[in-house]
Image (cartoon, rainbow, N blue to C red):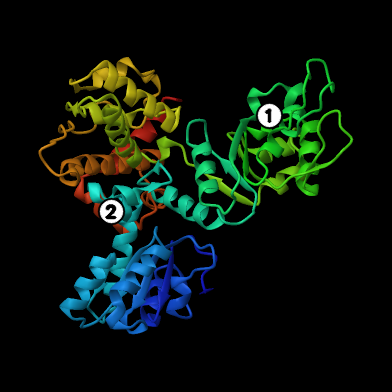
Amino acid sequence: MTSNDATTDRPLVLTLGCAEAARELRTLGYTISTARNLQQLLEPKEELHARILLIHRSCFDLDSSRTTVEGLRRAWPLVDVIIWAPKATASFVRQVLQAGARDVLLTNATRTVASSVERILEEQQLLPRAMRLGAEDELDSTFEGMVSRNARMWDLFDTASRVAPTEAAILVLGETGTGKELLARAIHQRSQRAGRFVAVNCAAVAEDLIDSELFGHVAGAFTGAIRDNEGLMRYASGGTLMLDEIGNIKLAGQHRLLRSLQEGTVRPVGSHREEPIDVRIIAATSVRLEEEVLSGRFREDLFYRLDVIRLEIPPLRERPEDIVYLFAHFARKFATQYAVERPHLASGFLDALVSYDWPGNVRQLENVTERLLLTSPNRKLNAAMLRKVLPFKNSSRLEPGRSAPTPPLDTRKPLREALAPHVERLERAYLEASLRQTSGRIGEAATLAGVSRRTLLRMMKRYAIDKSQYKASDERVRGEGL
């Protein structure tokens, strides 16, 4: 595939047989990549953060249109497929939509194509395609047990899927509780390695024991070494070893780790023999290793050895659309596990839920959900109950009284319909937070939200959001010297 706009930050659109539409999209600032043929799309070899596949119907056999689109959905599970099919028959449209196409465009107008791309990308940002709230879509919303509706997370899942079968070292970044070990385990599950997955938290291992923990030791190597220990690197040989909080390994241990990775061997403590290993390393950290390198606390050569593929998990506070979705996911799980009813939510509960910053991220949200179901079985959850189990002082995204009261979830309606008003409230909350952060500057807020300026203005109009109040708030804060 060839890309003509490698420097732009707009989402990547892969096209086939759509030269005119590609030119229109390019003028709007999108990154455009053109496939040579359909087979190249059905068997992708490159790692591309594509968000849209735009294909002209003339590029594939109409008799096999359904199986072709199904093949594209398997090859690009995180990407929306648009078929540009002027004057297509109703039968064709029905087949490709049932197969998973997101849109079928029956017009010759390239501007209509561009409008469809812009609309779908906007929906991906705030409500990605595979995260529709119907139960029939739930399997498509998970990545080896990790659940998200956030577009950045789906880009991360896409990259993880593509690099999993390789032998490349991976560095996973993310705050505590974001799911770094879950992601590492998912990569191992999708790899071709037959051995076991082993995880060790380097921060929990004493400095004088890290060599024995990783490389093993022979009996008598030190006081208390009464028998041989093979060490985790040999124990994980043939599989994957996750080194969590790798920045906590001291320099001497880093040197020995680097040598083992370079040579493919380990030397147990107290032994003179090199033992061969075949282990894939996934390192993880909640600190910036670049800063540790600059400060001299982390070896630069080891950093480059580990930082082949970088996967950064955004904190939960940066993906508010996931908060309600994950809460619903955990509530279903624990209701089944403990044989209790799924919770009913009083007005204001979801406002309190999304206004909290969740410093413990997904792990904290899961624990809080479990606690609420166990301490308040068969009761309607309200904001006061949530505040009792939360250190609510760091709530910052929503100001009290700014949002309209949250309607309770109506379990008599289908899930998608019941959650629709809550999705709209989250969308409004996200826009308001973006405008507060940028002091009402529309261009900056649109960039932050990942939508066009025109789209942001349209959404502000929909929710009657006045940018001037954010400018006034910013000026008042500066005037008070805060």
Q: In which quarter of the image is the C terminus?
A: top left
Q: Name the residue under label 1.
A: 248
**Percent from the top left, x then y, of residue 440?**
35, 43
**With 91 as the anchor, is 240 left or right in this view?**
right
Query: Where 9 falls versus 276 (above or below)?
Result: below
- 170 w.r.t. 377: above or below: below
Q: Extreme front residue here?
A: 227
Q: Which of marks 2 and 1 is in front?
A: 1
- Residue 198 horizontal/vertical position (percent): 60, 36
Q: Position of residue 51 (x, y in %)?
A: 40, 61
Indicate the quadrant where residue 207 lies: top right
Q: In this view, does 169 lie above or below 93?
A: above
Q: Is residue 355 left or right of residue 246?
A: left
Closer-to-camera residue (395/328): 328
- Crowding near pointer 2: few (<14 within 10 Å), some, many (20+)? some
Residue 478: in sight, yes or no? no
User: Residue under circle 2?
Assistant: 457
Left or right: 326, with 376 as reference point: right
Q: In which quarter of the image is residue 426?
A: top left
Using the image as rendered, state which of residue 409 and residue 293 is in the foreground: 409
Q: Which amino acid does label 1 sit on?
A: Asn
Question: Relative to the observer, which residue lies in front, 124 or 143?
Answer: 143
Instruction: State the residue at coordinates (77%, 22%).
Output: 227
Residue farthest left in this picture: 412
What distance separates the C-alpha of mark 2 from that of mark 1?
47 Å
Q: In the visual, does 60 lie left or right of 161?
A: left
**Amino acid type of the residue that numbered disc 2 sits on in the rendered structure:** Leu
Residue shown at 52% from the left, 30% from the top: 176
Residue 189 visible here:
yes
